[in-house]
Image (spheres, rainbow, N blue to C red):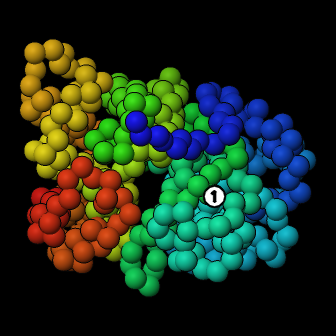
Amino acid sequence: MATHAYYVPPVNLMGRGCLQEAGKMIQDMDIRKALVVSDRQLISSGVAEQVLSILRKSGLDYVVYDEIQPNPTCQNVHEGLQVYQEHDCDAIISIGGGSPQDAAKAIGIVATNGGHIRDYEGLHQSHHKSVPLVAFNTTAGTSSEVTINYVITDEERKVKMVMVDRNSLVSLSVNDPELMLSKPASLTAATGMDALTHAVEAMVTPGGFTVTSATAAAAVELIFEYLPRAVRDGSDLEAREHMTYACFLGGMAFNNAGLGYVHAMAHQLGGVYDLPHGVCNAMLLPYVEEMNAKHVPGKFRHIAKAIGMDVKDKSDEECSMYVIDAIRQLSREVGIPEKLSELGVTDPDLELLADNAMKDACAPGNPYQPSREEVMELFRKII
């Protein structure tokens, strides 16, 4: 019988108000001075200040680097590393969604391993554990705060580098829905569909097993129930809280099962055209899973049940069609664009996108390995 490695941060605070408990835990980590990694919008909006005030109350000395881009770059990583080293920091605290989280993990890995962030593209390329990392999450989507994955854009190659590295796992994650109340509907929708993509791909990939399938199914169920509510009313704290649970559950699933061609393709759209990751995932998800359903239709029965279908006496094909239709309906309900042209991309380089997608670290996790022409055709469906 196969054995499985299961990675998850040692401590995870979640639920409304948990932010207030984080200060004491950080005090117990004996951090001398921390680099705080965030972005300008979170600083100017006051969201980051909710965390910074907790750090000050706990007596922690810190310095802020807030230049992180929506698709964090090599430049972001090495500028942040320079600040970390110049101020003699010994830990990193990230405040934000996937972009600050990914950048913080990258900075931490280079801080302890040296070299350039490009050296760590791929699977478990580092030799030493990152400096201590604390992740305050402000979106319910990427799950970067609880996974061993991070993604950095190589500006020179226009490629999103995928790093899967057990040494990048954070020491403490904090998921307080009160930090997410000000998120606009469009960002709520995009990050929520990103979380759905994580869960669905984790259930379809051959790398999934009983534990990951269970947490992914729970995530799917929560997302279909609560994402529309969170998009309609951003102040709906109950919906926000359940979306943080969904994000956490889906993160635990794909962190240990893997992803597939939705992410492999979405990474290229982000790397070449600087498009929002969650939106790209949402546009691609029904088409990629439509392809997968032709080859592994049985994988969709559990997903259909999580969404609410009575699967008794239903064929695998009926279950897969139900899932794909439900995904399309949810995307429309929360306002996800359907075509790249709506994002300003009218003539994408399909050959470049397909070639890079087939090299992406997520591609091997797909249950079916498409040809180059098949990948190009999938991209054509969203032009």
Report the front residue among 259 and 230: 259
Would residue 340 be found to the left or right of residue 127 on screen?
A: left
Would residue 341 be found to the left or right of residue 122 on screen?
A: left
Q: Residue 260: where, in percent of width, then height?
A: 31, 53
Would residue 15 be found to the left or right of residue 209 on screen?
A: right
Q: Residue at x 30, y 24 (%)?
A: 306
How dense is the environment of label 1, judged by Cα within 10 Å: few (below 14), some, or many (20 and up)? many
Q: Residue at x 81, y 44 (%)?
A: 26
Which quadrant is the C terminus positioned in? bottom left
Report the front residue among 293 and 156: 293
Q: Residue at x 14, y 66 (%)?
A: 371
Q: Residue 379: where, in percent of width, then height?
A: 17, 63
Extreme bottom residue here? 156
Q: Residue 154: where, in percent of width, then height?
A: 46, 77
Q: Give amino acid for label 1.
A: Asn
Q: Quadrant of residue 162?
A: bottom left
Can residue 28 be seen in the rendering of this structure? Answer: yes
Can residue 100 be seen in the rendering of this structure? Answer: no
Counting every numbered tag in the picture gives 1
Q: Residue at x 17, y 19 (%)?
A: 311
Which quadrant is the N terminus positioned in? top left
Give the residue pinned by disc 1: 167
Q: Residue 14: where, in percent of width, then height?
A: 62, 31
